[in-house]
């Protein structure tokens, strides 16, 4: 893909993973261009592409900038695409399991104290989240922390790509995933990594991600009945 397409895909994947959510403001143009290592002209073209697809909107004035939209249009388009290729979700989940269970295994043998601190902080944020947006961000932080702890940049990039391929902004859906169950899953993975139990870390991570398979079929493909709970989050 072209440089412009690559920049747009990078930002789009951040939105899909929950690292940027509805209403969030992107960093100023100069700062973001420097962060991504691209010319400001390329960044502007990427923003235009995202704007045309409904991911962001540009506001003028003293309080202006580039903001993430409510995402209703891009999610609708993505869901229509996935429904035409019903096996795609299973392929992505299988790919995530292959990557993330191995990352958890490596993290259990290579993690440092700062890695554990970051994972624990992400879990605490999940447990204390007061909105789906904050839960999504904390969830993303946890999975990214595990990937970094594996100390393999190619594996980390693959995990980011696989997670960015899924898109389920629960703010738009009736489905509510129990927070307690998700927090328990993440805590189990964390404890196994902290104990340097590589087999348990890999097994628990695989089980955690596999649980999203049926959830995604409900919220994206609308297979089965919509589930509800007392508190909600987004995808693990």
Image: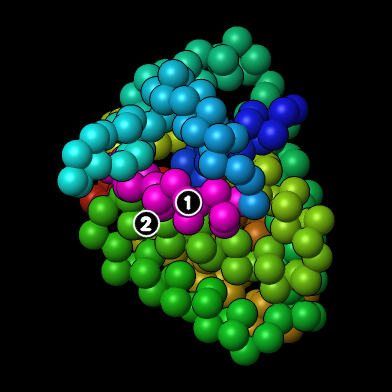
Of badges 1 and 2, nearer the viewer stands: 1
Q: CA distance from mark 1 to mark 2?
A: 29 Å
Q: Tell me if 119 is positioned left or right of 72 in this view.
A: right
Callout 1 secondary element: helix
Q: Tell me if 78 is positioned left or right of 137 in this view.
A: right
Q: Is residue 55 visible?
A: yes
Q: Could you say where residue 8 lies in the image, as x and y percent from the top left?
A: 57, 34
* Residue 24 sits inside the magenta stretch: yes
Give the extent of the magenta segment: 21-36
Front-most of residues 212 and 14: 14
**Mark number displayed over residue 30:** 1
- Quarter occupied by residue 54: top left
The N terminus lies in which quarter of the figure?
A: top right
Q: Earlier in the sequence, mark 1 or mark 2?
A: 1
Q: Could you say where residue 226 lies in the image, as x and y percent from the top left?
A: 35, 29
How crowded is the residue under tag 2: few (<14 C-alpha within 10 Å), some, or many (20+)?
many
> Relative to 62, is 194 above or below?
below
Q: Is residue 173 visible?
A: no
Pointer 2: what residue?
Answer: 135
Seen from this angle, which residue lies furthest bottom?
113
Callout 2 secondary element: helix
How crowded is the residue under tag 1: few (<14 C-alpha within 10 Å), some, or many (20+)?
few
Q: Could you say where residue 62 lies in the image, as x and y percent from the top left?
A: 18, 46
> Relative to 196, is 40 above or below?
above
The residue drawn where x is 51% and y is 24% is 49
Front-most of residues 110 and 210: 110
Seen from this angle, which residue lies furthest top?
84
The residue drawn where x is 75% and y is 70% is 150
* Residue 33 sits inside the magenta stretch: yes
> Relative to 215, is 49 above or below?
above
> Relative to 93, is 46 above or below?
above
Q: Tell me if 160 is positioned left or right of 229 in this view.
A: right
């Amino acid at each position: 893909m072209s440089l412009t397409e690559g920049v747009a895909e990078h930002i789009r994947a951040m939105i899909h993973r929950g690292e940027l959510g509805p209403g969030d403001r992107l960093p100023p143009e100069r700062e973001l261009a420097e962060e991504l290592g691209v010319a400001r002209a390329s960044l502007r073209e990427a923003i235009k592409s995202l704007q045309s697809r409904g991911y962001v909107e540009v506001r003028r004035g003293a309080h202006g900038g580039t903001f993430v939209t409510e995402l209703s249009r891009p999610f609708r388009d993505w869901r229509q695409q996935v429904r035409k290729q019903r096996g795609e979700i299973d392929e992505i989940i299988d790919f995530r399991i292959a990557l993330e269970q191995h990352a958890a295994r490596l993290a259990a043998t290579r993690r440092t104290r700062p890695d554990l601190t970051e994972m624990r902080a992400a879990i605490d944020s999940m447990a204390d989240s007061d909105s789906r947006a904050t839960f999504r961000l904390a969830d993303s932080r946890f999975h990214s922390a595990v990937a970094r702890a594996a100390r393999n940049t190619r594996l980390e990039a693959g995990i980011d790509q696989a997670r960015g391929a899924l898109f389920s902004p629960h703010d738009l859906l009736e489905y509510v995933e129990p927070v307690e169950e998700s927090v328990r899953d993440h805590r189990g993975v964390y404890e196994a990594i902290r104990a340097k139990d590589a087999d348990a870390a890999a097994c628990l991570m695989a089980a955690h991600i596999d649980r999203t398979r049926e959830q995604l079929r409900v919220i994206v493909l609308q297979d089965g009945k919509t589930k509800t709970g007392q508190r909600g989050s987004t995808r693990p």
